[in-house]
Structure formats: structure tokens, C-alpha cells
Amino acid sequence: MNDDALLAEQMAYYKAGAAEYDRPYAEYEDLQTLLAAVDDLPIAGDVLELACGTGQWTSRLAARAHSVTAVDASPEVLALARARTASPTVQFLEADLFEWQPPRRYDTVFFAFWLSHVPPTQLPDFWNTVATALAPGGKAIFIDDGPAAAAYEQVLADQPTPTALRQLDDGSQYRIVKVFHDAQTLTDDLTALGWSVRIRSMAGNFIGIAEPPPTPG
Ligand SMILES: C[S@@+](CC[C@H](N)C(=O)[O-])C[C@H]1O[C@@H](n2cnc3c(N)ncnc32)[C@H](O)[C@@H]1O
């Protein structure tokens, strides 16, 4: 399966599964611990949240930010996010992040459980887009699954892009991109692209804080 088809199926999965999305947040204490960790992260100013989903993180970001622009491709999850988020400083946008270019710069670019859904071949472009979305002194802050999470996924073998199979309550199945980044490799890859990065593990996940390469001149 090529990446375009895989990314379309990934989008279809989140559209179809919007109503089921919040269940792990209610069930897993680790996710509650991670959500609470946001309060100690250097979130500031105008924040861009990529792949905001049902808005689990959005209000917490808004509480620390001047404004939040939260982007997701699925109108179904955005409807849930809007219902959950009362803040007048939050704007939701529907867009495909593999096409969308940020129209301005932000002090913080935040993404939770999104990096693992970006195909490895697209990571240099992705990080470049994040860098150009950051104002001088701005930071990217990201949270995702570490390698241990692979034990809870149906990982499909021998795929050109790391792929997992997910199933919804109605039995429908979807292939998604799922890259279980190892903190050291991710640190090395970002450093090679010129970023300054600190990644720490928390509750089986990782939290990264990264500053882009200085712009020439
Ligand atoms: C794992 S969820 C993360 C949601 C939220 N950040 C969280 O941590 O709860 C991935 C999100 O990516 C969104 N998504 C999938 N493909 C996308 C695309 N091409 N552009 C924008 N968002 C996309 C899905 O709709 C879904 O809300």
C-alpha cells in the first residue's frame, strides 16, 4: 500500500472512530498522568496544536496560552473538541496536515500522538514545516508512544511504511501509520536536522521539547 492510500485510510479511521476516541483517556491512568504533565511544560504565547483530535489537550494548552489554533482533518473529532473546549481564545481549523501550510508563526507548536502517524519519509518535511511555523525563540512540544506501546498494537509485518491495524467497535478495520519512535534515535535524527532537543520518558510515553535550527542571517 502506498503512503497516500495509507494516509487516506488513517484519516478515515479517525473520522469513523471519533465517538470511540476518548475511551482510553477515561480508562488509562497513564494518559491522565500525561495530560497533567502539560501544566509543567513551557507552553506560551500563541500556540499551534497539530492533530488536536477531540480536544483532550486543547483546554490545557489554552489555560497557558495567549491563543490556540487547533488543526485536525476530521470534522467528527473537531465537533467533539469544540463541545469540550469553552475557551474563547481557541480557534479550530479543519485541514489535512500533509497539505496545510501554517499561515503565520507561533510561539509553541504542540502535537500529541501525531508524530507517530507521520511516515518516516515525510519526517524531514514535517520538521521543516514545524520549524517555519515557529516564531524566533519558539518551541515544538510533542508527546507520543514509545517502543513499549508496540505490544498493544497489531503491527503489520513487512510494510514499506510502519503500519498497524486498528479495529472499531463495529468490526471495521483500518490501516494506519504507526512509528514507535525511540527517544535516542529521535534525538539523533532531530539533532542531525539542526534542532536542539530534550526528550524524556513518562508513563511509557515520551515528551519532547525542541528548538529549530537558527535561521541563517
Ligand atoms: C492519535 S489522534 C491524536 C489526537 C490528539 N492529539 C490526542 O492526543 O488525543 C490523531 C489525530 O490525527 C488526525 N488526523 C489524521 N490524519 C490527519 C491529517 N492528514 N491531517 C490532520 N489531522 C489528521 C485524526 O483525525 C486524529 O484526530
Image: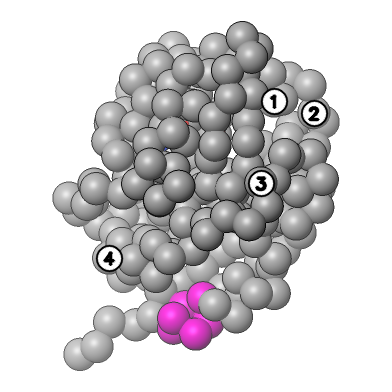
> CB of mark 2 within 8 Å of CB of mark 1?
yes
The furthest residue to the left? 103
For the residue pair 98 and 62, the one nearer the viewer reads as 98
Q: Amino acid at mark 3?
A: Leu
The furthest residue to the bottom? 217
Label 4 CB sits under 8 Å from any ligand 1 atom: no
Residue with the mark numbered 4: 132
SS under mark 1 = helix
Q: Earlier in the sequence, mark 4 or mark 3?
A: 4
Q: Amino acid at mark 1?
A: Tyr
Highlighted range, magenta: 190-195
Q: Check the picture and name the quadrant holding the C terminus.
A: bottom left
Residue 130, by quadrant, is bottom left
Residue 28's tag is 2
The Cα–Cα distance between marks 4 and 1, rounded to whole angstroms, is: 32 Å
Instruction: Please provide percent x and percent y for residue 124.
Output: 39, 70
Badge nearest the viewer, 4 or 3: 3
Label 2 CB sits under 8 Å from any ligand 1 atom: no
SS under mark 4 = helix
Residue 32, by quadrant, is top right
Q: Earlier in the sequence, mark 4 or mark 1?
A: 1
* In the displayed structure image, the side of residue 72 where residue 165 appears, left or right: right
Residue with the mark numbered 3: 156
For the residue pair 170 and 84, the one nearer the viewer reads as 170
Q: Earlier in the sequence, mark 3 or mark 1?
A: 1
The Cα–Cα distance between marks 2 and 4, rounded to whole angstroms, is: 35 Å
Label 1 CB sits under 8 Å from any ligand 1 atom: yes
The structure residue drawn at horizontal position 63% and vertical position 42%, both measured from the top left corner, is 164
The structure residue drawn at horizontal position 23% and vertical position 46%, both measured from the top left corner, is 100
Residue 25's tag is 1
| Number of numbered callouts drawn | 4
